[in-house]
C-alpha cells in the first residue's frame, strides 16, 4: 500500500470516528426519553468543548514531529468516549462523553491536514486533500448505511460496535503511513527552514494580521450556526411525526448528503480552478437558506432527498475549499495548522450554538419554525461574503507570495 492510499484509508475510517455516533446520538437519546432541548444542550456542550480545543490542537500539530501518534491517541480516545454511551445514558455521562469526544476529535482534522501537507507539499495539497475528502465522505456513506442497517436489524448496540471497528481501522491505517514520508517543516507551512521564518512562527500574531482569514472564519461561523443543527433536527422531526424508523431514516439522511458530498469533493478542485475560491464558497453560502426553506416545508420521508442534497453541495465543496484556502493564505508563515485550528474554532462557535438554538426553537415553536430561523440566520455569512467580496477575492485569486505579503499588511 502506498502512503497516499494509507492516508486515504485513514480518512475513510476516520469519518465514523471523528463525529462519534454523530446524528444517531439524537435518535438514540430520543428513544431513551430525552426531549429535543436536552439533546440540543448536550450536543452544544460538546460543540463548545471542541471549539475551544481546535486552536491548541492546531498549535500542537505544528509543534510535534509525532503526528501519527497524535492521530492514533485521538482516534482511540474518541472511540472510547463514544462507546461509553452504551453503558450509561445519564445526563452527566452523556455530557462528559460529548465533551471528551469533541476534545480528542478536535486534533484529528488539523493533524490529518498537517500530515497531508507534509507528504505532498503545497503544490500537491489541493489535489490530495480533495482525494482525502472523497474518501472521508465515502466513509461516512458506508458507516451510515451500515449503522442504519445494523441498528434496524440488531438494535442500537450494533451501531456502537461498528464505531469500535472503525476506530481500530483508523489506527491501522495511520500506522501504515511511514513516518519518514512526512516533512514536518512542510507540514506546518514553511517554504524554507530559515531562522527568520522560525522566529515568525513563534506566535499567533500572524493569524490576526491576515484579514481574509478572519473574514473567512466569521462567514463560516454564521454558516454553521444555521447548518449544524439541521441534520439531527430533521431526523428528529420526521421520526417524531412517525414517518420513519429512527435508525433507518437517520442513516438515510446521512447517506444522501454524503453521496452528494463525494460528488462535490470530486469536482471541487475543478470548480476552484475555473471559478476561484470566492465563487465556490459563495455557492455554498447560497445553498443553506434554500435548505432551511425546503426542510420547513417538507417534513416527510421523501423530503430528505432535497434537504440533504443541498447540505451535500455546501459541506462537500467547503470540505475541500476551506482547508486549501487556509494553506494558500498562510503558506510561508509556519502556522498553517494553527490557522486551520483557528478557523475551526471560530466556525465551531456557530456550530456549538446551533443545536441549542434549534432544540429550543423546535421544543417551543415547532420544527418548521426552527428550520426557517436557522436558514435565516445563515444569510449572515452570505452578506459578509458579499460586503467584503473585493478584499477576499483579491486574497483568493493572486499568487501565494503576494497573498502572504499583502494580507498581512491589510
Image: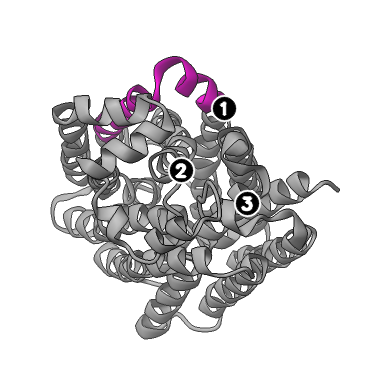
Secondary structure beneath label 2: helix
The residue carrying pointer 2 sits among few (fewer than 14), some (14 to 19) or many (20 or more) residues within 10 Å by Cα, namely: many
Specify whether 346 is left or right of 8. left
Q: Position of residue 171 (x, y in %)?
A: 71, 66
Q: In front here: 22 or 77?
A: 77
Q: Work out how far the residue at label 2 is from the one at label 1, CA to CA, in angstroms.
A: 23 Å
Position of residue 184 relative to residue 82, above or below, is above
What secondary structure is the magenta-colored segment mainly?
Answer: helix
Q: CA distance from mark 2 to mark 3?
A: 12 Å
Q: Which residue is mark 3?
A: 118
Dot 2 corresponds to which residue? 327
Image point 77% across, 45% down: which residue? 5
Across and down, in percent, residue 308 comes to 43, 35
Mark 1 nearby-residue class (10 Å; few <14, some 14–19, many ≥20): some
Nearer the observer, 284 or 150? 284
Q: Is residue 198 above or below residue 271?
A: below
Farthest-out residue, top: 274
Amino acid at each position: 500500500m502506498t502512503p497516499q492510499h494509507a492516508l486515504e484509508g485513514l480518512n475513510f475510517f476516520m469519518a465514523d470516528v471523528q463525529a462519534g455516533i454523530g446524528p444517531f446520538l439524537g435518535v438514540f437519546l430520543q428513544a431513551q426519553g430525552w426531549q429535543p432541548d436536552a439533546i440540543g444542550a448536550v450536543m452544544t456542550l460538546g460543540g463548545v468543548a471542541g471549539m475551544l480545543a481546535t486552536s491548541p490542537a492546531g498549535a500542537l500539530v505544528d509543534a510535534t514531529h509525532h503526528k501519527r501518534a497524535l492521530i492514533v491517541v485521538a482516534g482511540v480516545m474518541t472511540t472510547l468516549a463514544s462507546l461509553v454511551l452504551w453503558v450509561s445514558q445519564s445526563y452527566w455521562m452523556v455530557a462528559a462523553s460529548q465533551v471528551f469526544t469533541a476534545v480528542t476529535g478536535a486534533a484529528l482534522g488539523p493533524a490529518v491536514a498537517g500530515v497531508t501537507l507534509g507528504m505532498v507539499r503545497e503544490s500537491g495539497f489541493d489535489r490530495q486533500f480533495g482525494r482525502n475528502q472523497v474518501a472521508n465522505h465515502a466513509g461516512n456513506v458506508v458507516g451510515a448505511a451500515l449503522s442504519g442497517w445494523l441498528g434496524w436489524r440488531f438494535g442500537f448496540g450494533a451501531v456502537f460496535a461498528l464505531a469500535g471497528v472503525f476506530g481500530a481501522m483508523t489506527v491501522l491505517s495511520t500506522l501504515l503511513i511511514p513516518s519518514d514520508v512526512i516533512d514536518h517543516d512542510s507540514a506546518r507551512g514553511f517554504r524554507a527552514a530559515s531562522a527568520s521564518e522560525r522566529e515568525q512562527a513563534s506566535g499567533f500574531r500572524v493569524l490576526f494580521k491576515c484579514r481574509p482569514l478572519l473574514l473567512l472564519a466569521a462567514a463560516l461561523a454564521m454558516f454553521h450556526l444555521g447548518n449544524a443543527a439541521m441534520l439531527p433536527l430533521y431526523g428528529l422531526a420526521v421520526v417524531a411525526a412517525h414517518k420513519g424508523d429512527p435508525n433507518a431514516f437517520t442513516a438515510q439522511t446521512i447517506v444522501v448528503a454524503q453521496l452528494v458530498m463525494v460528488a462535490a469533493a470530486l469536482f471541487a478542485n475543478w470548480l476552484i480552478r475555473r471559478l476561484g475560491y470566492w465563487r465556490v464558497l459563495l455557492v455554498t453560502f447560497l445553498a443553506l437558506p434554500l435548505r432551511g426553506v425546503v426542510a420547513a416545508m417538507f417534513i416527510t420521508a421523501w423530503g430528505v432527498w432535497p434537504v440533504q442534497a443541498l447540505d451535500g453541495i455546501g459541506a462537500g465543496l467547503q470540505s475541500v475549499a476551506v482547508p486549501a484556502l487556509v494553506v494558500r493564505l498562510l503558506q510561508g508563515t509556519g502556522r498553517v495548522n494553527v490557522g486551520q485550528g483557528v478557523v475551526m474554532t471560530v466556525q465551531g462557535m456557530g456550530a456549538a450554538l446551533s443545536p441549542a438554538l434549534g432544540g429550543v426553537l423546535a421544543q417551543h415553536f415547532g420544527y418548521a419554525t426552527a428550520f426557517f430561523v436557522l436558514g435565516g440566520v445563515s444569510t449572515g455569512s452570505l452578506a459578509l461574503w458579499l460586503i467584503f467580496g473585493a478584499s477576499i477575492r483579491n486574497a483568493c485569486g493572486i499568487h501565494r507570495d503576494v497573498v502572504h505579503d499583502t494580507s498581512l499588511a491589510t
